[in-house]
């Protein structure tokens, strides 16, 4: 028998992205149903590196303290990595992807813990919000939209009960094999690298002892000449014993026909104790949905985009999807979002992922392949070492240039186009993340931002500020005004007026102008 349930938003998929979206909506008073197939969480460590930007989301979701308490590695290990040549202990290495290099541009520190620990924290936070109803252990049978709105038909695994769930909007956060994406008829573009990859989870105290020579590192990737730029990749799950490992393996490899301990020892370059806990496989490919929206159906996270776990972009990109889409759904449902606001989700987020895949992940594979084909310490040690050492500078440049932004989107305006390529700066720029600065009160600006839009007025003309306040009242747009001086660090913003979106991106900067037009554009054209 099928019963019917209604809510403004149904979220399919209860991983970090689905839970983050539910919390984003629930804190804004938007009722939502979250449907998750698994009754219990997986225990495979993945999606561990949480950037400073992602931790800003946890701050605003009221879960930062609990998340930091759940970490499994001491804080001094951060989320920094190491790149080695040939094997981990082969003698050539450099620091890689040290996101602490851009720490000053964000309000929070980064974090590292297994995805299942992150999900545990998010589940607990979601349970505290009355607007969120969770259905764990329910499988989606169908999803779509009709004249009455959007819907999901789901079945509970425990007893076979079926329910028809109706909503204004459905969001698929249900992974790379998304049932919502398939049901909505949203196609994908794939870039297949024709590589079978293994994921191993294993325990070894000996490896911890061997890697004490690299203090403060949480993951390690190995460039081997035979692998064409694809990595052998180790990561800590805890400090001292548990590890995960990704690497290319021959086609047809199974858990039963391959010597995985030998592969691990070759990648490290030494003998050590190994106790395998998990063997899994995945295909190395990059996929991006051709649209992130079809009518009342949206997709986010791996349902919208997937890529190999190179650089720790995956979970962070998905959580940024949730932050971007969440406030826009709330604004639309609460009546202060314009007709173009929901379309700006695809317009902003899809190009950012395309740029991440093209300009960082695939570029890194290509550059590593070219380096390995060109330089060999056995044939020309001097040339190899000169160019190997230069890669450290390149690594720093890459961290600084990964700065997702929404330049030129319809709700931001101006030139440019949304991209993952940018540069970190304290200057306030339309379409870019707001950098933190202290206020005269002693608080940080991030502690004073409003739930909806915020206007930073720094030695600004009071008449212009009043015009913004009046326009916000007329348009029904919630606006928090922070009045302060252009001193004490705030002069770095290089603007008198800065309009900040609910996701902490800058919508507009200036000295004056048509306040109503600026606000109307920022909310999608009221």
Image: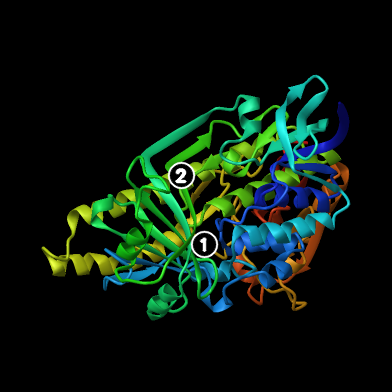
On the question of residue 333 being in view, the answer is yes
The residue under the point 80% across, 26% down is: 149
Which labelled disc corresponds to residue 424? 1
The numbered mark, 1 or 2, whose residue comes first in the sequence reads 2
Residue 495 in view of the camera: no
The residue closer to the viewer here, 513 or 451, is 451
Question: Residue at the spot x=82%, y=55% of the render?
Answer: 127
Give me the C-alpha separation between circle 1 and circle 2.
Answer: 34 Å
Residue 354 rendering spot, x and y as whole percentages: 48, 41
Residue 77 or 101: which is nearer the viewer? 77
Judging depth in this view, the residue of 419 and 431 nearest the camera is 419
- Horizontal side of 454 relative to 436 (left or right) equals right
Q: Is residue 284 above or below residue 425?
A: above
Instruction: Tell me residue 263's x, y (percent).
Output: 33, 59
Secondary structure at badge 2 equals strand
- How packed is label 2: few (under 14 Cα within 10 Å), some, or many (20 or more)? few
Residue 409: percent from left, percent from top: 60, 41
Q: Of the residues tagged 1 and 2, which is closer to the observer?
A: 2
Structural crowding at the residue carrying mark 1, measured as other residues with C-alpha within 10 Å and reported as few (<14), some (14–19) or many (≥20): some
Name the image quarter holding the C terminus. top right
Q: Quadrant of residue 215?
A: bottom left
Quarter of the image for the N terminus: give it.
Answer: top right
Residue 161 found in image quarter: top right
The residue located at (80%, 51%) in the rendering is: 468
Residue 416 vertical position relative to residue 203 in the rendered view, above or below? above
The circle on residue 18 is: none
As drawn, the label of residue 282 is 2
């Amino acid at each position: 028998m099928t019963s019917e349930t209604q809510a403004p938003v149904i979220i399919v998929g209860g991983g970090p992205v689905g839970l983050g979206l539910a919390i984003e909506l629930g804190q804004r008073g938007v009722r939502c149903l979250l449907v998750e197939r698994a009754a219990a969480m997986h225990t495979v460590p993945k999606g561990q590196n949480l950037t400073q930007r992602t931790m800003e989301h946890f701050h605003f979701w009221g879960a930062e303290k609990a998340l930091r308490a759940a970490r499994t590695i001491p804080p001094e290990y951060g989320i920094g990595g190491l790149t080695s040549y040939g094997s981990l202990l082969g003698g050539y290495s450099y620091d890689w992807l040290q996101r602490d290099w851009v720490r000053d541009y964000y309000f929070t520190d980064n974090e590292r813990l297994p995805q299942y620990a992150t999900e545990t924290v998010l589940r607990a936070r979601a349970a505290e919000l009355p607007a969120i109803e969770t259905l764990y252990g329910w499988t989606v049978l169908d999803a779509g939209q009709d004249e009455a709105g959007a819907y999901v038909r789901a079945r509970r695994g425990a007893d076979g009960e079926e329910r028809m769930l109706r909503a204004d909007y459905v969001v698929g956060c249900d992974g790379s094999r998304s049932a919502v994406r398939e049901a909505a008829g949203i196609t994908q573009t794939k870039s297949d690298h024709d590589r079978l990859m293994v994921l191993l989870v294993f325990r070894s105290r000996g490896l911890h002892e061997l890697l004490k020579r690299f203090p403060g590192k949480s993951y390690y990737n190995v460039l081997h000449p035979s692998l064409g730029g694809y990595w052998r990749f180790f990561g800590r799950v805890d400090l001292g014993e548990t590890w995960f490992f990704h690497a290319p393996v021959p086609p047809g490899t199974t858990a039963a026909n391959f010597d995985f301990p030998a592969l691990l020892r070759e990648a490290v370059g030494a003998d050590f104790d190994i106790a395998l806990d998990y063997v899994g496989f995945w295909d190395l490919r990059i996929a991006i949905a051709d649209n992130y929206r079809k009518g009342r159906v949206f997709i986010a996270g791996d349902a919208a985009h997937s890529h190999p776990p190179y650089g720790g972009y995956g979970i962070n990109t998905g959580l940024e999807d949730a932050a971007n889409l969440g406030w826009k759904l709330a604004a639309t449902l609460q009546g202060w979002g314009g007709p173009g606001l929901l379309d700006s989700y695809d317009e902003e987020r899809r190009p950012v992922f395309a740029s991440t895949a093209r300009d960082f992940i695939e570029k890194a594979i290509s550059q590593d392949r070219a380096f390995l084909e060109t330089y060999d310490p056995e044939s020309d040690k001097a040339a190899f070492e000169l160019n190997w050492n230069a890669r450290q500078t390149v690594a720093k440049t890459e961290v600084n240039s990964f700065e997702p932004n929404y330049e030129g989107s319809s709700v931001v305006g101006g030139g440019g186009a949304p991209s993952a390529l940018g540069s970190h700066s304290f200057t306030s720029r339309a379409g870019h993340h707001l950098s933190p600065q202290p206020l005269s009160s002693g608080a940080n600006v991030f502690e004073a931002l409003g739930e909806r839009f915020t206007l930073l007025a720094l030695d600004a003309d009071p008449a212009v500020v009043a015009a913004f306040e009046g326009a916000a009242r007329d348009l029904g747009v919630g606006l928090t005004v922070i009045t302060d001086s252009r001193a004490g660090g705030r002069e770095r913003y290089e603007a008198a007026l800065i309009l900040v979106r609910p996701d902490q991106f800058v919508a507009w900067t200036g000295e004056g102008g048509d306040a109503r037009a600026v606000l109307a554009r920022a909310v999608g054209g009221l």
